[in-house]
Structures are given as structure tokens and as C-alpha cells.
Amino acid sequence: MKKALSQQTSLTPWDLDIVLSLSRVSQMEITGEKLDSLGPGLITVEQKRAIELLRDQAFRYQWQLADALAGNSSSWRFREDNQAFNAKLSRKLEYVYDMFQE
């Protein structure tokens, strides 16, 4: 799919990876039990609050959860021309997707 998409668009390899990761289907639900399991260190207090606002909500696509988090806090938004921040944010999102996957 990546090859086909790269032939049809002018996205950079970095942007292609983001698009593909956000289009993955995976059932996720933000539960209190899983919220309590979030480890300290990787997720900031502000980011954890943004996740807590989504308690008892379910998401079918990773992009839906990423969008909801970005709507709750700017700390979950990708930044133009800041690859280091975006790489770290991508790792945090992968952690959150894995944590809340059913």
C-alpha cells in the first residue's frame, strides 16, 4: 500500500508513514482500568488529562483517537518543521494505541 500511495502522491516518506499509521483499523476503548495503567514518564500530565477526557469512548481507527487527543490538547498535535518532536509524538501515539487496544 505504501508503494501505491507514494506513486499517487507527493508525500515525503515521513508523511507516508504518518498517513499509513493513522489509517489502521484497530478497536480501542479508553477505560478507567487502562488509564490507571499508563506508566509515568512517557506521557506528560497534560497529555494524560487529554486522554482522561476520552474516558468510556471507543475508537475504530487510530486517526480518530489521534484527532480526539489533538482536539483536547495541543500537546497531541504534530508541529510543522519539528521532526524531533513529531517522532517523539508518534512513539507516544503508538504507545497509547497499544495501551487501549481491545
Image (spheres, rainbow, N blue to C red):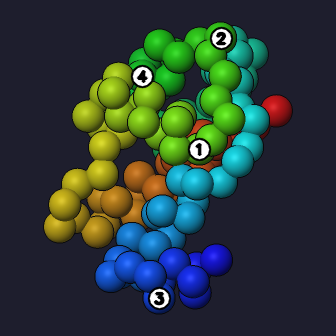
User: Rounded to the nearest whole Å, what is the CA distance between mark 4 and mark 2?
Assistant: 13 Å
- Describe residue 81's horizontal placement relative to residue 77 as left or right: left
Element under label 1? helix
Q: Which residue is mark 2?
A: 56
- Depth-wise, is mark 4 or mark 2 nearer the camera? 2
| Mark with earlier residue (3, 1) | 3
| Mark with earlier residue (2, 1) | 2
Element under label 3? helix
User: Rounded to the nearest whole Å, what is the CA distance between mark 3 and mark 1?
Assistant: 24 Å
Crowd tier of the residue under label 2, counting other residues whose Cα lies within 10 Å: few below 14, some 14–19, many 20 or above: few
Task: Please identify the quadrant where the N terminus is shown.
Answer: bottom right
The amino acid on which the numbered mark 4 sits, given as a three-letter code, is Ala
Crowd tier of the residue under label 1, counting other residues whose Cα lies within 10 Å: few below 14, some 14–19, many 20 or above: many
Determine whether label 2 and label 1 are within 8 Å by CB. no
Residue at the front extreme? 8
The amino acid on which the numbered mark 3 sits, given as a three-letter code, is Gln
User: Rounded to the nearest whole Å, what is the CA distance between mark 3 and mark 4?
Assistant: 36 Å
The amino acid on which the numbered mark 1 sits, given as a three-letter code, is Gln
Element under label 2? loop
Residue 7's disc number: 3
Residue 50's disc number: 4
In this view of the protein, which residue sits in the foreground, 25 or 43?
25
The number of numbered discs placed on residues in the rendered structure image is: 4
Q: Which residue is mark 1?
A: 62
The amino acid on which the numbered mark 2 sits, given as a three-letter code, is Asp
- Depth-wise, is mark 3 or mark 2 nearer the camera? 3
Residue 7 position, x and y percent, is: 47, 88
Query: In which quadrant of the rendered view does residue 50 lie?
Result: top left
- Depth-wise, is mark 4 or mark 1 nearer the camera? 1
| Mark with earlier residue (4, 2) | 4
